[in-house]
Structure formats: C-alpha cells, structure tokens
Amino acid sequence: MNEMYRVLLIIWLIPIVALSKSNVLPERTIENVADGVIVTYNFREPIIQPNHLVPGSFLWKYMGFGINDTSGEPAVPFRSDVFYIPRGYTSQVDITDTIYNDTTLILSPSIPCHIKNEMPELIDSIRKYHGFFPENVIKQSPIDDYRGIGLQRIIITPVQYNNEHHIVRFYSMIKYKISFILKDTNKGDIPYSKKNSRKINNFLSKIVLNYNDLPSTLSRGELFTVPDTTNYLIITVNDFLDSLQSFIEWKRIKGNRVFIQSKNRGEWTTDSIKDVINHLDSLHTLDYVLLVGGFDDVPADSFSYNVSITNYDGVTDYEYGLPTGNLQIPKISRGRIPVNSSQELCTILKKITKYERAPIRDVDFYKRALHCGEFSDYNTNKYEDACCIQTNENIREHLLHNYGFLINRSYYFFDFAGGPNSTDILHWNNILYGYGAALPDSLQPSAHFEWKANNVLSRINEGVLYVLYNGHGSIGGWQAPSFTTDVNNLHNGNKQPIIFSFACLTGKYNENGDCFVEKILKKGDGGCVGIFAATESSMAGYDDAMAYGIFDAIWPNLQLVYDFNWYSPDLYTHFVNPVYELGKVLDLGFLRMSETFGHLNSERRKVTMKLFHYFGDPSMMIYTDVPQDFDSPIIKYTSGKIRVISPSENTRITFYTPSDTQPIVDTFIGDSIDYETNADSVIICLDKHNYVPYIQTFYKDLYIQNETINSQREYVGKNILIGNHVTEEKPVGDVLIEDANVTIQGKSVTLHSGTRIGNSRVKINTR
C-alpha cells in the first residue's frame, strides 16, 4: 500500500466512523470443538478521534475494547477473554486466520486515567521500540487456579502500531484457537477442589467464554436438592468476641459454617492473618472472610503507588481474598467492619442482622434511589473532565426503564468560572471516556436543571434502597455535593441504604479519627448497612467501569444510553443470573473493569482492586424488592428424618444444631429435603433472595427415663414423657430429681409413675 493511498484511506475513514460510532460493535463468535475453543472477532469501522491533548495524534477505538494506558506505549485497543481449562490439561493458543490493512496515522500515546481529586496528568511520548507494538495480536497469561478450576486469560489487541513510520496495522478479522493438551500426569495437575459449590459455578459462568464446559459436582438427589453450605471466617480481637456471639449464631442459622480466629490487641500481623486464611481455606474452602476491627487491631497490607508525580499510600484487604495471579479474581469474598469498641460493633451488627432478618416492607423504599456526583470542568470548555455524571446517568436510565426505579439526582457543576451559565451547552468527555456528545436536554442549564443542588440528607432520611456517589471525595466525605458532617443529622431509622462511594479516600479507615465510612456505618439511628469505598485516592475510568460491573451484577443486562468508550454489554459479559451477595458483587465489578481497563499487567488495575473494599458483611444480600413470606412450608418428622418442603423452588434450606463444642450446619438448595439427625432439636431456616427468612426450631419427642438429676439442667422437646417406663429405647428405671434446678419445656409434658422429686426446683413450660 503506497503512502498516498494510506493518507486517502484515513481521510475517508474519519467522517464515516464519526457518523456510525453507535453501530460499530465488533462481532464475536465462539465455537466449541472437541479439543478446544475457536473464537472469531470481526471488526467493522473503527472510531477514530483526534486527541486534542496531543495535537496531531489520533485515538483508534472499538466499542467494547479498552485502550492501553501504560505510560510510554501506544494507545492501542484491547480486551480480555477468559477460558476454563479442563482438569489435567494445559493449553496452546494459535492464530488461525487474520485479515488486516496498513495505513498511515499518528497514533496517540497512551492516556493514563487520572486521580479524581487532581487534574489529568501530562501524557508521555511513546518510548522507542522496533517494529510493531504489540508484537502479537494475541497474548496468553499463565493458567491460574480458582478454587481448583483452571482459568486462562487471552488478550486480544486488534491494532498494532509502528511508531517509527507511523503505520497503523488494523485487523478486520482475527480468528484464534485455544487448544486443550493433555499434560504429562507425572508432572501433576492443578489441585482441583473436591466440591465446587453452586455459587462458585454461578460466579465462573459470568467469567469464562466456555462456561458450558465447567465441571459440575452438583448431583441432584431424589428430592431435587443439592448441598450448599458455605464457610465463613471471622478474624477479630478477643475484646470483641462477646459482642460477636449473636451475629455468629445468625450466620450459622443462615447456612454458614463459622470459624473464629482471635488474638489480643496488637498481636495480629498481616502475615499471621494470611497464614490463618490460607490454612483454613486449604481445609474448608472458605467463601467469606470478615475482618472485625480497625487497622491497629486487625491490620491490612500497606502499599504505595505513583500517579504522575504524586505518591500515594494505601491499605488493602485485597490480598486476604487469595487472588489468582494475572486474572486478579479473589477466591474469597471479603468484608471489614472497622470498629474500635464493642459498642460500635454491636450497633453495626444489629443493623446488619435486622436488615436480613426483619427487612423493610415499604414498597416505595425498594424503588427509590439517589444518585450524587460532580461534573468537573477544570478546563472550562464545557466538557466533563472525567465521566462521573455520565456513569450515573447511564445507570439511572437503565434502572428507570428496565426496573421501574424512581431515582433522584443531586449533581454539582464545578469549573473555575463559576458556571454553568444558562446559555452553556454541556458535553460528555470527548477523549478517554466518551465521544463528546451533548448531555440530554433535561440536564442542560437552559432547562434550569439544578446543578448546585444538595438534597443528599433529605433524600436519605426519606429512605432509599441505595445511594450512588461518583465524584471527588475526602476522608471526611463527599466533596460536591458536599456531604460530610451532615452524617450526624441522618435519622433514617431502619430505612438504611447500601452506599456505592466511587470517590477518593472515603474509606481511609487507617487514619486517626473516623473516616466517612466509619461515621455512616456506626450511626445508630440511621446511616447505612453497608458501603463500597476506597481507602486512598482512586482513578477515573477504572471506578466507572467497576461501577457498571457492580450494577450489572445486581440488575443484569445494563444497556448504556450514553456511549462509554470501553463498555459493551451487547457483545460480551452478560450477568444473566443476578448476584446479590455484596462481597461477590465487588469482585464482579473488578472483573468487568479488568476486561477492558489496564492493558496486560497494568499497575493501575491492580491498584484499583486494592483500593476498593466492601465495608460490611460480605455474605449479605441486597434486597431488591419487597420481601415475600414463605407460605406455609411443611416440616415434619418421619422415620427418623426431618422432611422439609418449601413452597418456593431454589430455597436455601439450613439445618443448624447448636453446640458449645461442635455446632453442625448443613445447607441444601432446592424445594425439599429429607434430613437425618440424632439431635433432640434442630434450628431450620428457609432462605431465598427477596424472602423473609423462615426460622423454626424443630424438637423431637423427649423421653426421660432411668436418670438421676442432681444439678442444673434444661430439657427441651416436642412431647416430653418422664417416668420409669416411657420408652423401650432406654433401660427401665426411676427418674430421681434431687437437689436440682430443672427447667422442662415442650408442647406437652407428662409425668408418669416412677418420677420422684425431692428438695428441687422444677419449672415446667408448655408451648
């Protein structure tokens, strides 16, 4: 191709792509074959934009593809595909076919996302290299282990750039095959777990392209029920143990085997915490880790990162989730409750338990939400510097039209000129995050939109299901609209939201005094019941891609109204089955971000995953509708088994046998189960998303025969019979109650012959 043709090609392309940018989604087809998977990408017109930050250079974009943001490298588009690798196999990736053209264009150097609280950083020039970057359009990562499942990430880069001659090699078609190759069994396999729970498979089905090949050990029983018990680790200090007991019991009733690890204050280190997690995970395959205590009591990893010329120091619980190499997918859902006293802890735990056990029944509460954020225009050019309001509006439109929400706004416009003026026309970002389109008419100053309003306090006090804030922040709270000391004036009672705080510093709990997260969690007569927040300064773009993933996990099939460069649910990951557990929701947000943000081993992607935390119970599910009651479930005892029949399918049915030494928790998912137990009493819990948990203690008939009772005792049963011959299962003999303090509780209590009571206090309660 000669030089003149290349120039003409670019002149021809630019107006075409400008007109068709909303209809140029690449096509991807996936073909499962006997020895692997074949993937074909077809790319239509690219989106080519001049980059006014680097005059004379251009950005080459495809919908659904991210852009390399590694300083000093070309801004080439890319995305990641993830595959399941069968047990005992390795993989080989081969490009089987391509179609490409070369053209002349000065491609922009990478544009690093900027810290929200700062001006965008200066862009470096492209460092010298030979030939094309990247060398290959397909790159594979090592195989990683996620709970015994092999996962591999494949990076597709449909543009290569020769900086010396300004040649852009753009591909209209890329076909590659990932082949599964049987390994030498003497070299060992990935340590696949013995059991992959329903939740693990559900999580992975949202990640891998060949999800139909995932192994399933969920063999269905006669009554269409499968095991579903989860393992929950709490790490804390001894001072908090008493305050945790009722919460621990509640988590067990909800179907978790709870493990407690505690030390004196000042004894925990990050290494000792990791040792405990690794050990218990190797024994039990942990699902959740809850860290209870502040930074000094239950420390987090410290890390530093540099953006432009500024260095930041953060803390993170991310490593406690045992991340899996390049995929950066934590194995264990994490949560933290940062408290300094038992009183603070009791306040938060009571809020969580009440949210789960006795949820609000107000219909309006589940359809109300609040979006807050700042439209920053430091350049005073009427274009949004980042994409905070654009992200808020995309999510708002999705929930308004597809889920019937009523979402109020509290937006703030900031520039150095005191705008906006009534004649101004505002636009979305036109470089890294969007295409510069004008905001909808309803948000324009000419429509008298309230760009300086602050109704955060009144809306939360009214009661909202969730609050989304996207903008600048500080340790004390949100910058614009300002919401810091107003936390003290929250009186929303039990109508407590989940808060999504995509802002700098609001979760920096390792500083002296309470940060925003701590203040709003500890609020006794209101506040929130859980909050997502960053422990240091966060980056625009990364936050937004994560926000889309989080909301798409809870309310699936998020369709964007306003173009966000790097997110295309039409083509790629669909979270068809919602995920409501908030610890897992965070990790799915990381997953969506990782598909298109952070080329190869991007440090900024890793930093973002370390920054953002869920503060609260990671196993807690967000209610998304008015909770229903289980309608007359059947619980009966037949032939030595407890039979439970739920009126609703896919019910989580838990049998909990309390014990001071070895409590037993067995959980199943289905609509009915026969459960065999020798225990005299079992707590049964029926649980399902958007249902009020149904809890009943089941008691067997109790026979007291041939016993001498001379201490404090308590007997609980259904029908209790006492005497010298009330059952054939025990030796015949009198019951002697002497110098004792005895409580007997049952539906009926009958004293037969052979019962003798002397110098004792006997209290009989019948239900």
Image (cartoon, grey):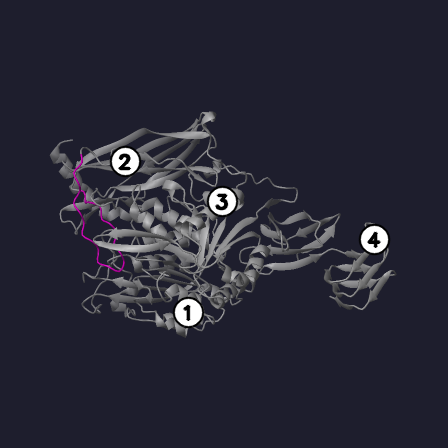
- Give the alpha-carbon distance from disc 2 to disc 1, as whole Å: 50 Å
Residue where numbered disc 1 is placed = 460
In the rendered image, residue 279, in percent from the top left (x then y), is placed at 49, 44
- Is 220 left or right of 55, judged from the image as shown? right
User: Callout 4, which amino acid?
Assistant: Thr
Residue where numbered disc 3 is placed = 279
User: Callout 2, which amino acid?
Assistant: Ser
From the image, state whether disc 2 or disc 1 is nearer to you. 1
Instruction: Check if mark 2's residue and mark 3's residue have beta carbons within 8 Å.
Output: no
> What mark, if any, has residue 499 been given in the picture?
none
Residue where numbered disc 2 is placed = 172
Instruction: Check if mark 4's residue and mark 3's residue have beta carbons within 8 Å.
Output: no
From the image, state whether disc 1 or disc 3 is nearer to you. 3
- How many C-alpha atoms fall within 10 Å of the one at disc 3: few (<14), some, or many (≥20)? few
In the rendered image, residue 351, in percent from the top left (x then y), is placed at 50, 65
Mark 1 or mark 3: name the one nearer the start of the chain: 3
User: Callout 1, which amino acid?
Assistant: Ile
Question: Dot 1: what SS?
Answer: helix
Mark 2 or mark 3: name the one nearer the start of the chain: 2
Mark 4 or mark 3: name the one nearer the start of the chain: 3
- Give the alpha-carbon distance from disc 1 to disc 3, as whole Å: 42 Å
Instruction: Check if mark 2's residue and mark 1's residue have beta carbons within 8 Å.
Output: no
